[in-house]
């Protein structure tokens, strides 16, 4: 199977051609709830989840970014249906992370607060084999942990084994990641001809966390090519599927300045 290519086809076809235990990580965002018109394309989540399970290496992960549409004041919960489809396909729900939009598109949401997040499910095939956590400095580095600690949520008990331990200078960030969306999320103007692009930083943070250089990253709904661009710049191998020829052409134009290979997408 040729790598560094976006296959202009239904991802089911690409997945069927892959050998088993092939992908280190998938990061993708499906066209859920017909929220946008992606030229009318649909996808079977159960079949994709089952196929991804076979094609993912043991310890590999799938980052599945998805939200819910609100219809007549009622949320679809498609994201939850997707999560159960992945569980049924034998993936573990390793972490339910949130992708928060710092500058969500303004909308009149009636008697509801402004919708500003999507789920960022981390499904894993067994225990993840790679975890390079993003960290942040701690405020109380060097101090000793006491029996009681005042936290944001109140006065908490500390497990016996932690009492007296020195607080480290760094800690893992929380599983809520916030990004700017819209024009500040990528410098590539052509990418915005696609209606729903990933913030590049989101893709970079997830690829850094779950893979190492040389690993293979797949995006089954490649859209404008964000995953391909970021994976390439991070020295990962990559592979994609995108059913719309129009979007493949957008990604081709977007990626041209970054890629060494001229013919990066294959004929069917
Ligand atoms: C949410 S967008 C992905 C955008 C992408 N993350 C980016 O940064 O540009 C979903 C994409 O899936 C494509 N698509 C829909 N059904 C598909 C299928 N069965 N196989 C492959 N691509 C599909 C749509 O054309 C659309 O471009």
Image (cartoon, rainbow, N blue to C red):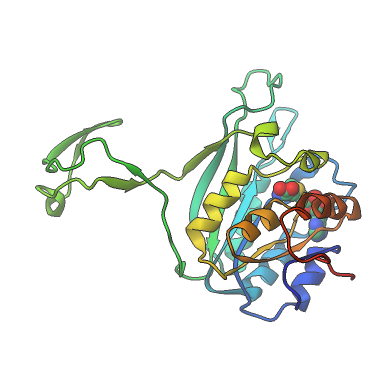
Q: Give the x, y percent position of residue 135.
A: 37, 47
Foreground pick, 73 / 208: 208
- The residue at the point 65 percent across, 52 percent down is 81
Task: Look at the picture and state if 142 lies above or below 49.
Answer: above
- The residue at the point 56 percent across, 66 percent down is 91
Left/right placement of residue 177 relative to residue 198 reads left
On the image, which quarter does residue 53 sit in? bottom right
Task: Look at the picture and state if 87 lies above or below 171.
Answer: below
**Is any part of residue 67 visible from this angle?**
yes
Foreground pick, 213 / 223: 213
Residue furthest to the bottom in view is 19
Q: Give the x, y percent position of residue 73.
A: 70, 27
Foreground pick, 162 / 182: 182
All told, the count of numbered labels is: 0
Task: Look at the picture and state if 129 lies above or below 39.
Answer: below
**Is any part of residue 93 visible from this angle?**
no
Left/right placement of residue 146 relative to residue 62 reads left
């Amino acid at each position: 199977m040729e790598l560094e290519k976006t296959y202009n086809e239904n991802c089911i076809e690409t997945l069927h051609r892959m050998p088993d235990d092939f992908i280190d990580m998938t990061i993708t965002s499906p066209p859920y709830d017909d929220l946008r018109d992606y030229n009318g394309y649909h996808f079977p989540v159960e079949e994709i989840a089952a196929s991804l399970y076979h094609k993912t290496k043991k310890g590999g992960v799938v980052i599945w970014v998805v939200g819910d549409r609100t219809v007549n004041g009622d949320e679809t919960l498609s994201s939850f249906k997707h999560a159960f489809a992945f569980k049924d396909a034998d993936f573990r729900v390793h972490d339910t992370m949130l992708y928060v939009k710092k500058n969500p598109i303004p909308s009149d949401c009636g008697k509801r607060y402004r919708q500003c997040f999507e789920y960022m499910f981390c499904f894993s095939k067994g225990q993840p084999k790679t975890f390079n956590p993003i960290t942040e400095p701690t405020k109380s580095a060097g101090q000793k942990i006491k029996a009681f600690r005042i936290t944001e949520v109140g006065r908490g008990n500390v497990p016996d084994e932690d009492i007296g331990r020195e607080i480290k200078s760094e800690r893992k960030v929380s599983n809520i990641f916030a990004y700017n969306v819209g024009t500040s999320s990528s410098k590539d103007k052509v990418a915005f001809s696609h209606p729903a692009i990933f913030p590049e930083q989101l893709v970079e943070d997830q690829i850094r966390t779950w893979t190492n250089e040389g690993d293979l990253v797949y995006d089954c709904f490649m859209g404008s090519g964000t995953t391909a661009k970021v994976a390439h710049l991070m020295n990962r191998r990559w592979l994609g599927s995108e059913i719309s020829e129009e979007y493949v052409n957008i990604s081709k134009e977007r990626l041209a300045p970054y890629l060494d290979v001229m013919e990066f997408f294959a004929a069917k």
